[in-house]
Amino acid sequence: PRSVSHEALMHRFIDRVINEGDYSVLTDLLHPDYVYRAPGQELHGVEAIRAVLEAYRSALPDLHIGVDDLVAAGDRVAIAFTLTGTHAGTLMGVEATGKRVKVNGTLFSRLEGGRIVEEWEVIDQLSLLAQLGVVSLPG
């Protein structure tokens, strides 16, 4: 029996870790065998994801994830989210522009033993790069 609902665990992860930058709770929330997958990227372990999260927070100091929708079933949680922030540091090789960004994404998580063990994330990187002025979109 789990002590906290999967929904509550995911909200705690987003609120404390992503939005507040409190990485001290990562070991409580992530399974020791944690794997993160995104297009072209696969990370293993708490320290690997911590480094990525710290890099994003450095680039977007006011980084915020707003949960638009969350569905939990069995050991899985699906989240649609909106990421916002001000580009104040290097992000994906792009020097700070000072621009505000707003992009959509999805996060699909699998939980085991009351912790997140596996995640798949897709963020609209094309829109992000367009908002930073790196690429231009037709239309």
Image (tube, rainbow, N blue to C red):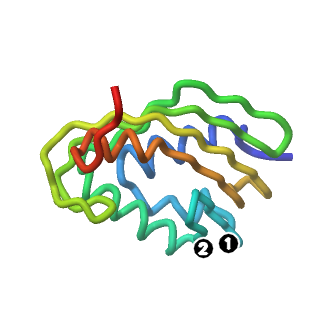
- Mark 2, secondary structure of its residue: loop
Q: Point out residue 99 in the picture as x, y percentages from the top left corner.
A: 17, 40
Whether the residues at callouts 1 and 2 have beta carbons within 8 Å, the answer is yes
Quadrant of the rendered image containing residue 85: top left
Quadrant of the rendered image containing residue 57: bottom left
Rendered residue at 42%/49% (across/down): 18
Q: Point out residue 124 in the picture as x, y percentages from the top left corner.
A: 47, 42
Label ID, residue 45: 2
In the rendered view, would you say 67 is above or below 21?
above
Q: Quadrant of the C terminus?
A: top left
- Mark 1, secondary structure of its residue: strand
**Along the line of sight, the residue nearer the viewer: 1 or 47:** 47
Q: What amino acid is labelled 1 in the image?
A: Pro
Separation of marks 1 and 2 at Cα, in angstroms:
6 Å
Viewed as shown, does residue 125 lie left or right of 12? Answer: left
User: For the residue carrying disc 1, how many other residues have a C-alpha within 10 Å: few (<14), some (14-19), or many (20+)?
Assistant: some
User: For the residue carrying disc 2, how many other residues have a C-alpha within 10 Å: few (<14), some (14-19), or many (20+)?
Assistant: some
Rendered residue at 66%/66% (across/down): 35
Q: Point out residue 63 in the picture as x, y percentages from the top left corner.
A: 32, 44
Viewed as shown, does residue 112 lie left or right of 96? Answer: right
Q: Which residue is mark 1?
A: 32
In the rendered view, would you say 6 is above or below 30?
above
Kindly report which numbered mark, 1 or 2, lies closer to the viewer in this rendering.
2
Q: What amino acid is labelled 2 in the image?
A: Gly
Label ID, residue 106: none
